[in-house]
Amino acid sequence: QVQLVESGGGLVQAGGSLRLSCAASRFVGSINVMGWYRQAPGTQRELVATITRAGDTNLADSVKGRFTISRDNAKNTVYLQMNSLKPEDTAVYYCNAQITYLRNFNYWGQGTQVTVSS
């Protein structure tokens, strides 16, 4: 059973920073794209940032210039550095991994709460 274990969420004041981590384990194959999505109450889950195995990144317009995504392929881990946090960044953040073994599989972490107070 593939595991994506997230850490780093919490409560922070507006303008502050947090760093999320997500480590993948118990899988066979190759992790292609890793990313972060978020879901605020009453809204749909939305993309925050993704990164390919080669390091190509894609960030939502709402976080460009404030968030940075990176990964360590040797550790099967993806990071999300969040700076200049705003109350509207408050959400549950989910890690995502697209793994290829004979075919493509899509996996999600359990989610970590990020709360930004004004």
Image (spheres, rainbow, N blue to C red):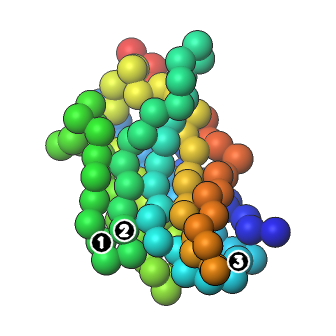
The residue wearing badge 1 is 55
Q: Give yes or no for contact between labels 1 and 2 (Cβ–Cβ under 8 Å).
A: yes
10 Å neighbourhood of mark 3: few (<14), some, or many (≥20)? Answer: some
Query: CA–CA distance between discs 1 and 3?
Result: 21 Å
Q: Amino acid at mark 3?
A: Phe
Please, which residue is most extreme toward the front here?
A: 103
Q: Secondary structure at mark 3?
A: loop
Q: Amino acid at mark 2?
A: Thr
Q: Amino acid at mark 1?
A: Gly
Q: Is 54 drawn above or below residue 104 in the view shown?
A: below
The residue wearing badge 3 is 27
Q: Give yes or no for contact between labels 2 and 3 (Cβ–Cβ under 8 Å).
A: no
- The image quadrant that residue 76 belongs to is bottom right
- Comes first in the chain, label 1 or label 3: 3
- Comes first in the chain, label 2 or label 3: 3
Can residue 117 be seen in the rendering of this structure?
A: yes
Q: Is 54 drawn above or below residue 38 in the view shown?
A: below
Please, which residue is most extreme toward the bottom here?
A: 74
10 Å neighbourhood of mark 1: few (<14), some, or many (≥20)? Answer: some
The residue wearing badge 2 is 52
Q: Secondary structure at mark 1?
A: loop
Q: Position of residue 96 (x, y in %)?
A: 55, 54
**Which quadrant, please, contains the C terminus?**
top left
**Which quadrant, please, contains the N terminus?**
bottom right
Q: Secondary structure at mark 2?
A: loop
Please, which residue is most extreme toward the right here?
A: 1
Residue displayed at 58% across by 33% down:
92
